[in-house]
Amino acid sequence: MLMIKWFGIGHCTASCVLGLRLSANDAKLFFSTLRVPCMRDAYLIGAGQTPFGSMPEESYRSLFDHAVSEAIDSVDHGIDTNAIDEAVVGSLGVGGRQLGLSGPAATEHAGLHGVPSVRVENACAASGYAVRQAVQAVKSGMADVALAGGVEVMTDMSSDVTKYWLGVSGETEWERLTGTTFSGVYAQMASAYLREYEASEEHLSMVAVKNHRNGAKNPKAHLGFECSLEDAVGAPVVADPLNLYHCCPTSDGAAVALIASEDVVGQYTDDPVRIAGVGAASDRVGLFQRNSYTSISASEMAADTAYDRAGVGPDDLDFAEVHDCFTIAELLAYEDLGFCDRGEAPQLLEAGTTESDGAMPVNLSGGLKSKGHPIGATGAGQLVEAFKQLTGGAADRQLAAPKYGLTHNVGGSGGSAVVHILEREAAR
Amino acid sequence: MLMIKWFGIGHCTASCVLGLRLSANDAKLFFSTLRVPCMRDAYLIGAGQTPFGSMPEESYRSLFDHAVSEAIDSVDHGIDTNAIDEAVVGSLGVGGRQLGLSGPAATEHAGLHGVPSVRVENACAASGYAVRQAVQAVKSGMADVALAGGVEVMTDMSSDVTKYWLGVSGETEWERLTGTTFSGVYAQMASAYLREYEASEEHLSMVAVKNHRNGAKNPKAHLGFECSLEDAVGAPVVADPLNLYHCCPTSDGAAVALIASEDVVGQYTDDPVRIAGVGAASDRVGLFQRNSYTSISASEMAADTAYDRAGVGPDDLDFAEVHDCFTIAELLAYEDLGFCDRGEAPQLLEAGTTESDGAMPVNLSGGLKSKGHPIGATGAGQLVEAFKQLTGGAADRQLAAPKYGLTHNVGGSGGSAVVHILEREAAR
């Protein structure tokens, strides 16, 4: 075993148990010759969220504060807010309450003082990207502990106002001007899918039934009730072929994840959850400009990168939280994330593979469909479920000793996507 | 000199000229024993911007595209857009044209396909934070080349609409509800400063005169004309004691910086500009909640971190681009950034130290005051000036062989701040 003790950086020297003395320049050359990608590992050491739902008594600040508190409380050995080096807050800023500086405004209220704080926005993938950015902050060496979260308040506005704020998250120059909303865009994807493959509207409803069944076991779910296939098939049409049960709700809520470097993770937990791989990608924002209506290439690219970096494949996963803003999106996710081949998502569903007791449970939290979809909080909320599952805190929804989980967060109709693969390192 | 050749990562072995063979686990232990902060250096390899001004014929997308093109053209040995691994776009999103997914929407139009793209927002510090995020992406090992920029379109709206969009970037729950605008907030800071120190309104005007003199040499400046002290003193009052010449304009514009890792910088330039230090911090968003009205503690903290990481101090700097949204802000910046002691900014100004031919030229580009302030583009625009100065491309404004430059970007009235210190490594 080669050991070198290093007494600082800069124009110092290092003493080496091999008897060598290295100048800073020698050391620099040594490292550059090594060409080891200079990445340190990042770990998820805590995660928490508010309930998702309609909470007129809360503000974006109070919601974020609650989520920060729950995340902090979830850290195995505890953590002081002073240990947090920086913060990233995902939010679309629906309603324009605090459009500018809403990162610092949210974090100051949560008791984080002075640290760099910034808002990131990528429509519905805002806090998935916030988590990714926190991972970069930690891997870069510029932070040892980074807080990443998201928040949105959506239910205290008229549906026209909500429609405006969501509308300007679609492609505004052409799609929005033709009157297309997100349900319209996903309805086009659903139509294309039903035409192209052996799939029916009932498959769209089966996703809703499954996710409501899971969400009914999640006390934080917005629509935490079960629904029958009959209900999910017969609901009023929103945008043909999508009916009400094929659409997620708009919700209020916040979620927060705490990311720590490998150098400090041991201070916070003996049961580390490693962020084994992260991938992200973007695509044309307008659906009409894409190559395919029946796949989301940003999801595919993000997943490929994440699998590659984690050194695992879909078969290694024990569960996944995927972006089911509309139930068609979950079918596309099965295929984009490599859970099955193109056109085979309906069979996966029929076989029960993605049920909570199947080989590959998907959306144990209830997903966006049942748990809810407070835009900016959704991506970080997926990490909350993954953290609970991997650390044994998922109560009635708990899987037996999962090792790998995946989260998949999509912006808009696929203009952006981000995938995290999480690994529980210790054997239970 | 110690040299180790490394043949990959994972469960491989490394061969060492010292005759040792290292397993991957040994190597991991070796690195963790070293405890060298695992940071690789990041370099500014190119930067470009549109003119700042009123450009009703342009959209946020076309502006961003122009800035990307200029940044790419500025790279010494050239660069293909395919080499760009990710993109970060700073924007407040004034006007709400494309509130969601405006990162991917901007970058797709600029010919970047597939790569992760995200918008960051920190009010007027949006693209300063975007650059910082690109630095983290590169240092993390997750990107070799990252594009960071910003864009804003502000001049095609009525002043009431602009006022709304800027208003929701101040502290909205208390400050904005009392009717305070940013000129009002900075007027309070100016009042406090004039009361506390030996300073007069004329000092506020002297900043304007200096920055307009510089901006008159910048073909990209929005208000690229000189103004007399008489004009700058006698202008109509906006918010007492601030008059029209104490306020920057609202502008349209975009700016882009290209950041590369030390591993690839040699492919792009023989005259590398290292990002020697980055610091960022936040503070209470509402001025009324701060400890001081005559300093911006986020700027102080950000500068301290940046100096510390760069291993240089204010005396080492050859120039600085500071955030002069109102001329009082430039006086505060002199003190917050350590160019002089508290209360001594007026003397620094009177001595001509911060003039273009002084010992410490400030805002050679014209600053926000004369060059303009397209909110989301401002921070990256400061990097453009620094890049030009350090690589000898600043034409009529060119300093003789500067080595160190600093950029300082503030969000709102100081709710956030970010400082970059840039170092030209080669001697000219």
Image (spheres, coloured by chain):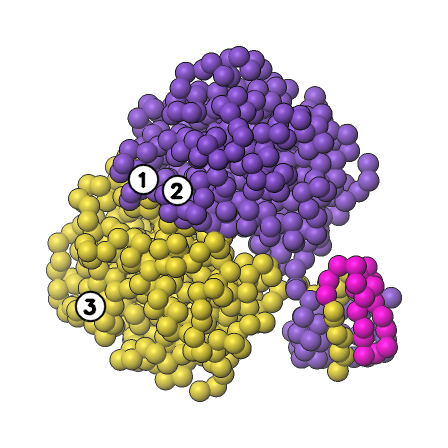
Chain colours: A yellow, B purple
Query: Looking at the picture, how far across and down is residue A116, in whole percent?
Result: 49, 53
Q: Please give the name of the residue rendered at 55% of the width and 15% of the height, measured from the top-left corner.
A: B229
Q: Are marks 1 and 2 in contact (CB under 8 Å)?
A: yes
- Viewer-nearest residue: A365 or B114: A365
Let me know if marks 1 and 2 both belong to one chain.
yes
Name the residue tied to disc 3. A224
- Viewer-nearest residue: A278 or A88: A88
- Viewer-nearest residue: A293 or B312: B312
Q: Is residue A17 magenta?
A: yes
* Direction from residue A273 to residue B160 in the image, left or right: left
For residue B338, say whether it is visible: yes
Span of residues in magenta: A8-27
Q: Which mark is residue B287?
A: 2
- The chain to which mark 3 is attached is A
Q: Amino acid at mark 2?
A: Leu
* Direction from residue A404 to residue B404 in the image, left or right: right
From the viewer's perspective, is residue B304 above or below residue A50?
Answer: above
Mark 2 and mark 3: Cα distance apart in space: 42 Å
Q: Secondary structure at mark 3?
A: loop
Label 1 neighbour load within 10 Å: few <14, some 14-19, many 20+: many
Q: Secondary structure at mark 2?
A: helix
Question: Which residue is at the far bottom?
Answer: A428
Q: Quadrant of the N terminus of chain A?
A: bottom right
Q: Quadrant of the C terminus of chain A?
A: bottom left
Name the residue tied to disc 1. B175
